[in-house]
Image (tube, rainbow, N blue to C red):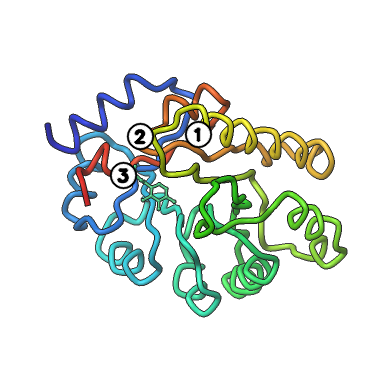
Amino acid sequence: MNCVDRFKAIREKVPSNIKIVAVSKTKPATLIEQLYTATGHKTFGENKAQELNEKHSVLASDIDWHFIGHLQTNKIKYIAPYVGLVQSVDSFKLLSEIDKEAKKQNRVIPCLLQFHIATEESKYGFSIEEAKRMLDDPLFQELRNILPCGVMGMATFTDNQQLVRKEFNMLHYYFTAIKTSYFSQQPDFREISMGMTDDYLLAIDEGSTIIRIGSGIFGGR
Ligand SMILES: *Cc1c(COP(=O)(O)O)cnc(C)c1O
Protein backbone atom coordinates (compact mmCIF):
# COMPACT_ATOMS: atom_id res chain seq x y z
CA MET A 1 0.00 0.00 0.00
CA ASN A 2 1.12 3.57 -0.63
CA CYS A 3 0.35 6.60 1.51
CA VAL A 4 -2.90 7.29 -0.34
CA ASP A 5 -4.30 3.82 0.32
CA ARG A 6 -3.13 3.82 3.89
CA PHE A 7 -4.70 7.21 4.52
CA LYS A 8 -8.00 6.10 2.95
CA ALA A 9 -8.09 2.94 5.04
CA ILE A 10 -7.64 4.95 8.24
CA ARG A 11 -10.12 7.63 7.14
CA GLU A 12 -12.75 4.93 6.60
CA LYS A 13 -12.13 3.37 9.98
CA VAL A 14 -12.32 6.65 11.89
CA PRO A 15 -15.60 8.54 12.52
CA SER A 16 -15.93 11.49 10.16
CA ASN A 17 -16.14 14.07 12.97
CA ILE A 18 -12.59 13.20 14.04
CA LYS A 19 -9.84 15.18 12.36
CA ILE A 20 -6.79 13.40 11.06
CA VAL A 21 -3.47 15.21 11.00
CA ALA A 22 -1.17 13.48 8.53
CA VAL A 23 2.21 13.78 10.26
CA SER A 24 4.69 14.28 7.46
CA LYS A 25 7.87 15.03 9.44
CA THR A 26 11.04 13.69 7.80
CA LYS A 27 9.03 12.79 4.66
CA PRO A 28 9.57 14.58 1.33
CA ALA A 29 7.19 17.22 0.02
CA THR A 30 6.42 15.00 -2.97
CA LEU A 31 4.67 12.49 -0.69
CA ILE A 32 2.58 15.25 0.87
CA GLU A 33 1.64 16.47 -2.57
CA GLN A 34 0.69 12.94 -3.60
CA LEU A 35 -1.71 12.56 -0.69
CA TYR A 36 -3.08 16.08 -1.09
CA THR A 37 -3.73 15.63 -4.81
CA ALA A 38 -5.21 12.14 -4.61
CA THR A 39 -7.52 12.67 -1.63
CA GLY A 40 -7.93 16.39 -1.10
CA HIS A 41 -6.65 15.94 2.44
CA LYS A 42 -5.30 19.25 3.66
CA THR A 43 -4.18 18.87 7.26
CA PHE A 44 -0.53 18.00 7.79
CA GLY A 45 1.68 18.02 10.89
CA GLU A 46 5.34 18.94 11.24
CA ASN A 47 7.58 19.15 14.28
CA LYS A 48 10.47 21.33 13.06
CA ALA A 49 10.06 24.96 12.05
CA GLN A 50 12.69 24.92 9.32
CA GLU A 51 11.40 21.73 7.72
CA LEU A 52 7.87 23.08 7.87
CA ASN A 53 8.98 26.30 6.21
CA GLU A 54 10.68 24.49 3.38
CA LYS A 55 7.60 22.37 2.70
CA HIS A 56 5.23 25.29 3.05
CA SER A 57 7.17 27.24 0.47
CA VAL A 58 6.85 24.56 -2.23
CA LEU A 59 3.37 23.13 -1.54
CA ALA A 60 -0.21 24.31 -2.03
CA SER A 61 -1.07 27.43 -0.04
CA ASP A 62 -4.35 26.01 1.28
CA ILE A 63 -2.65 23.27 3.31
CA ASP A 64 -3.57 23.56 6.99
CA TRP A 65 -0.21 23.14 8.71
CA HIS A 66 -0.21 22.01 12.33
CA PHE A 67 2.91 22.45 14.40
CA ILE A 68 3.28 19.47 16.75
CA GLY A 69 6.83 19.65 18.11
CA HIS A 70 8.77 21.59 20.67
CA LEU A 71 8.79 25.15 19.36
CA GLN A 72 11.68 27.46 20.16
CA THR A 73 10.61 31.05 20.65
CA ASN A 74 13.13 32.34 18.08
CA LYS A 75 11.52 30.17 15.38
CA ILE A 76 7.93 31.35 15.82
CA LYS A 77 8.33 34.26 13.45
CA TYR A 78 9.00 31.94 10.52
CA ILE A 79 5.76 30.00 10.83
CA ALA A 80 3.52 32.73 12.28
CA PRO A 81 2.36 34.03 8.87
CA TYR A 82 0.63 30.77 7.95
CA VAL A 83 0.54 28.10 10.66
CA GLY A 84 -3.01 26.78 11.18
CA LEU A 85 -2.70 25.33 14.68
CA VAL A 86 0.16 25.20 17.15
CA GLN A 87 -0.62 21.99 19.03
CA SER A 88 2.39 22.04 21.31
CA VAL A 89 2.17 25.11 23.52
CA ASP A 90 3.87 24.16 26.76
CA SER A 91 4.64 27.44 28.53
CA PHE A 92 3.26 30.93 29.02
CA LYS A 93 6.46 32.33 27.56
CA LEU A 94 5.88 30.44 24.32
CA LEU A 95 2.24 31.43 24.20
CA SER A 96 3.02 35.11 24.72
CA GLU A 97 5.70 35.00 22.02
CA ILE A 98 3.24 33.38 19.62
CA ASP A 99 0.81 36.15 20.50
CA LYS A 100 3.44 38.76 19.72
CA GLU A 101 4.34 37.30 16.34
CA ALA A 102 0.67 36.75 15.46
CA LYS A 103 0.01 40.39 16.19
CA LYS A 104 2.79 41.44 13.81
CA GLN A 105 1.08 39.34 11.15
CA ASN A 106 -2.27 40.83 12.05
CA ARG A 107 -3.73 37.42 12.70
CA VAL A 108 -5.01 35.19 15.50
CA ILE A 109 -3.18 31.87 15.82
CA PRO A 110 -5.16 28.89 17.13
CA CYS A 111 -3.28 26.93 19.83
CA LEU A 112 -3.60 23.80 21.93
CA LEU A 113 -2.15 23.46 25.41
CA GLN A 114 0.13 20.46 25.55
CA PHE A 115 -0.10 18.39 28.73
CA HIS A 116 2.46 16.02 30.15
CA ILE A 117 0.50 12.79 30.55
CA ALA A 118 3.22 10.18 29.96
CA THR A 119 5.30 8.53 32.65
CA GLU A 120 8.45 9.37 30.65
CA GLU A 121 10.41 12.40 31.81
CA SER A 122 11.30 13.54 28.33
CA LYS A 123 7.89 14.54 26.99
CA TYR A 124 7.08 18.21 27.12
CA GLY A 125 3.89 19.71 28.47
CA PHE A 126 2.07 21.43 31.30
CA SER A 127 0.96 19.77 34.48
CA ILE A 128 -2.63 20.63 35.36
CA GLU A 129 -1.37 22.91 38.17
CA GLU A 130 0.94 24.80 35.82
CA ALA A 131 -1.83 25.24 33.29
CA LYS A 132 -4.26 26.57 35.88
CA ARG A 133 -1.63 28.97 37.20
CA MET A 134 -1.19 30.34 33.69
CA LEU A 135 -4.91 30.58 33.00
CA ASP A 136 -5.48 32.36 36.33
CA ASP A 137 -2.77 34.91 35.58
CA PRO A 138 -4.17 38.28 34.43
CA LEU A 139 -1.33 38.39 31.86
CA PHE A 140 -2.98 35.47 30.09
CA GLN A 141 -6.15 37.50 29.65
CA GLU A 142 -4.18 40.17 27.83
CA LEU A 143 -3.25 37.88 24.96
CA ARG A 144 -5.46 38.86 22.03
CA ASN A 145 -3.76 37.16 19.11
CA ILE A 146 -3.86 33.55 20.23
CA LEU A 147 -7.01 31.42 20.32
CA PRO A 148 -6.98 28.52 22.80
CA CYS A 149 -8.77 25.62 21.07
CA GLY A 150 -8.16 22.71 23.43
CA VAL A 151 -5.51 20.31 24.66
CA MET A 152 -2.92 17.93 23.26
CA GLY A 153 -0.94 15.07 24.77
CA MET A 154 1.30 12.11 24.03
CA ALA A 155 0.92 8.85 25.89
CA THR A 156 3.80 6.77 27.18
CA PHE A 157 5.58 4.74 24.51
CA THR A 158 4.60 1.27 25.73
CA ASP A 159 2.65 -1.86 24.86
CA ASN A 160 0.73 -1.47 28.10
CA GLN A 161 -2.72 -0.56 26.75
CA GLN A 162 -4.12 -0.06 30.19
CA LEU A 163 -1.55 2.63 30.98
CA VAL A 164 -2.09 4.37 27.64
CA ARG A 165 -5.86 4.33 28.18
CA LYS A 166 -5.41 5.79 31.65
CA GLU A 167 -3.27 8.62 30.26
CA PHE A 168 -5.78 9.47 27.53
CA ASN A 169 -8.55 9.37 30.11
CA MET A 170 -6.51 11.82 32.20
CA LEU A 171 -6.09 14.22 29.28
CA HIS A 172 -9.83 14.14 28.63
CA TYR A 173 -10.36 14.90 32.31
CA TYR A 174 -7.95 17.88 32.13
CA PHE A 175 -9.80 19.13 29.07
CA THR A 176 -13.14 18.99 30.84
CA ALA A 177 -11.78 20.65 33.99
CA ILE A 178 -10.23 23.53 32.04
CA LYS A 179 -13.17 23.91 29.70
CA THR A 180 -15.55 24.15 32.66
CA SER A 181 -13.47 26.62 34.67
CA TYR A 182 -12.07 28.88 31.95
CA PHE A 183 -13.66 28.37 28.55
CA SER A 184 -17.28 27.38 29.12
CA GLN A 185 -18.42 30.35 27.03
CA GLN A 186 -15.93 29.70 24.24
CA PRO A 187 -17.09 27.18 21.63
CA ASP A 188 -13.65 27.25 19.98
CA PHE A 189 -12.18 25.47 23.00
CA ARG A 190 -13.26 21.98 21.96
CA GLU A 191 -10.32 19.89 20.74
CA ILE A 192 -8.59 16.95 22.38
CA SER A 193 -5.60 16.00 20.25
CA MET A 194 -4.47 12.52 21.24
CA GLY A 195 -3.70 9.27 19.47
CA MET A 196 -0.96 8.32 17.00
CA THR A 197 -0.41 5.34 14.69
CA ASP A 198 -0.24 2.74 17.44
CA ASP A 199 -2.91 4.05 19.77
CA TYR A 200 -5.44 6.12 17.84
CA LEU A 201 -8.37 3.72 18.27
CA LEU A 202 -7.81 3.73 22.01
CA ALA A 203 -7.58 7.53 21.94
CA ILE A 204 -10.85 7.85 20.03
CA ASP A 205 -12.46 5.55 22.53
CA GLU A 206 -11.33 7.98 25.24
CA GLY A 207 -12.74 11.05 23.51
CA SER A 208 -10.09 12.25 21.08
CA THR A 209 -11.22 14.80 18.46
CA ILE A 210 -7.89 15.05 16.57
CA ILE A 211 -5.57 12.13 15.84
CA ARG A 212 -2.00 12.60 14.58
CA ILE A 213 -0.92 9.81 12.27
CA GLY A 214 2.59 9.62 10.84
CA SER A 215 4.06 6.18 10.13
CA GLY A 216 0.59 4.66 9.66
CA ILE A 217 0.20 6.85 6.57
CA PHE A 218 3.70 7.59 5.29
CA GLY A 219 5.53 4.47 6.50
CA GLY A 220 8.32 4.13 9.05
CA ARG A 221 10.84 6.90 9.68
C1 LIG B 1 5.75 11.92 15.14
C2 LIG B 1 4.57 12.37 15.91
C3 LIG B 1 3.31 11.81 15.71
C4 LIG B 1 3.05 10.67 14.73
O1 LIG B 1 3.62 9.48 15.22
P1 LIG B 1 3.34 8.08 14.49
O2 LIG B 1 3.57 7.08 15.56
O3 LIG B 1 4.32 7.99 13.37
O4 LIG B 1 1.93 8.09 14.02
C5 LIG B 1 2.25 12.31 16.44
N1 LIG B 1 2.40 13.31 17.32
C6 LIG B 1 3.59 13.88 17.55
C7 LIG B 1 3.68 14.98 18.55
C8 LIG B 1 4.71 13.43 16.87
O5 LIG B 1 5.90 14.00 17.11
SS type, badge 2: loop
Work out whether 62 lies above or below 108. Answer: above
Q: Which residue occupies the foreground of this view, 79 or 67?
A: 67
Please rate how many residues cluster around mark 3, counting C-alpha atoms within 10 Å: few if below 14, some from 14 to 19, many from 20: many
Decide if ligand 1 comes within 8 Å of the CB at mark 3. yes
Work out whether 69 lies above or below 16. Answer: below
Q: What is the quadrant of residue 171 in the picture? A: top right
Q: What is the quadrant of residue 19 in the picture? A: top left
Query: Where in the figure is residue 64, as x and y percent of width and height?
Result: 42, 50
SS type, badge 1: helix
- Report the residue at 78% width, 53% height from top: 129
Q: Mark 1 points at which residue?
A: 164
Query: Where in the figure is residue 14, as x and y percent of width and height?
Result: 39, 22
Work out whether 24 lies above or below 161. Answer: below
Name which residue type carries label 2: Asp
Please rate how many residues cluster around mark 1, counting C-alpha atoms within 10 Å: few if below 14, some from 14 to 19, many from 20: many
Mark drawn on residue 198: 2
> First in sequence: mark 3 or mark 1?
1
Q: Name the front one of labels 3 and 1.
A: 1
Q: Which residue occupies the foreground of this view, 189 or 158?
A: 158
Q: Is residue 138 visible?
A: yes
Q: Mark 3 points at which residue?
A: 214
Marks 2 and 1, Cα distance to the nearest angstrom?
A: 10 Å
